[in-house]
Image: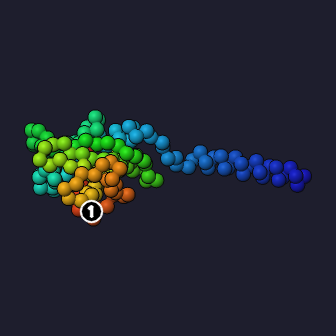
């Protein structure tokens, strides 16, 4: 009789464990490309002055190009940068991250490369980016670049934008 109760108790525990495991939130595995597509879109922050380094609009294109538009009424992008994805992940809160090698391609007078990190929140409404220059007058290779480990609003090169509706 005790043996039957023990087996029944173990069976009940096993079933409860399976039910709880099925209810637990799962970290969704995404390919780098699927994660990158969460960043694609037009991002706006009209509190920025509208300079090339603090543009009011940033566009992340599906072809791994970022664009800087000084203001929402600008007729063309004035800056452009290539995005080479190094690593992507989703954190426990559902925010998506992309560590990448940024190479400014336009304007020609401002060419440089840095290690960068961007994050889009779970709802896809807020985009943040920060980068770490590796020294003046020197363009680091992808392997030499200093990649931020986390989004840090205290870094000199920190940006925050909201998805254009």
Image coloring type:
rainbow
Q: Residue furthest top?
A: 63
Q: Is residue 71 left or right of residue 134?
A: left
In percent of width and height, residue 46 lies at: 15, 52
In the figure, is residue 106 to the left or right of 2?
A: left
Q: How many marks?
A: 1
Q: Would you say residue 161 is visible in this rendering? A: no
Category of crowding for the residue at label 1, using alpha-carbon neighbours closer than 10 angstroms: few (below 14), some (14–19), many (at least 20): few
Q: Position of residue 139 (x, y in %)?
A: 24, 51
Q: Is residue 24 visible?
A: yes
Along the line of sight, the residue nearer the viewer: 137 or 161: 137
Disc 1 designates what residue? 155
Decide: is 2 above or below 32: below
**Foreground residue among 67 and 2:** 67
Q: Position of residue 110 (x, y in %)?
A: 14, 49
| Residue at position x 70%, y 46% in the image | 15
Residue, far bottom = 154
Instruction: In this rendered view, identify the residue nearer to me: 104 or 140.
Output: 140
Q: Position of residue 76 (x, y in %)?
A: 11, 38
Left or right for 125, reference 23: left
At horizontal 28% and vertical 42% (from top left) the residue drawn is: 83
Q: Nearer the viewer, residue 137 or 73?
A: 137
Q: Name the residue rendered at 86%, 49% in the picture.
A: 4
Q: Quadrant of the C terminus?
A: top left
**In this rendering, is residue 116 above or below 35?**
below
- What is the secondary structure assignment of the residue under circle 1? loop
């Amino acid at each position: 009789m005790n043996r039957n109760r023990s087996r029944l108790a173990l069976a009940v525990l096993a079933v409860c464990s399976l039910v709880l495991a099925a209810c637990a939130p799962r970290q969704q595995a995404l390919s780098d490309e699927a994660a990158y597509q969460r960043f694609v879109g037009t991002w706006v922050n009209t509190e920025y002055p509208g300079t090339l380094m603090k543009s009011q609009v940033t566009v992340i294109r599906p072809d791994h190009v970022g664009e800087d538009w000084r203001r929402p009424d600008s007729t063309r992008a004035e800056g452009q940068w290539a995005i080479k994805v190094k690593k992507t992940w989703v954190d426990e809160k559902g925010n998506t991250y992309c560590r990448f090698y940024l190479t400014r391609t336009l304007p020609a007078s401002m060419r440089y490369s840095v290690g960068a990190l961007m994050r889009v929140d779970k709802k896809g409404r807020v985009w943040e980016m920060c980068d770490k220059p590796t020294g003046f007058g020197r363009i680091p290779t992808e392997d030499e670049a200093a990649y931020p480990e986390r989004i840090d609003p205290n870094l000199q090169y920190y940006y925050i934008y909201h998805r254009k509706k």
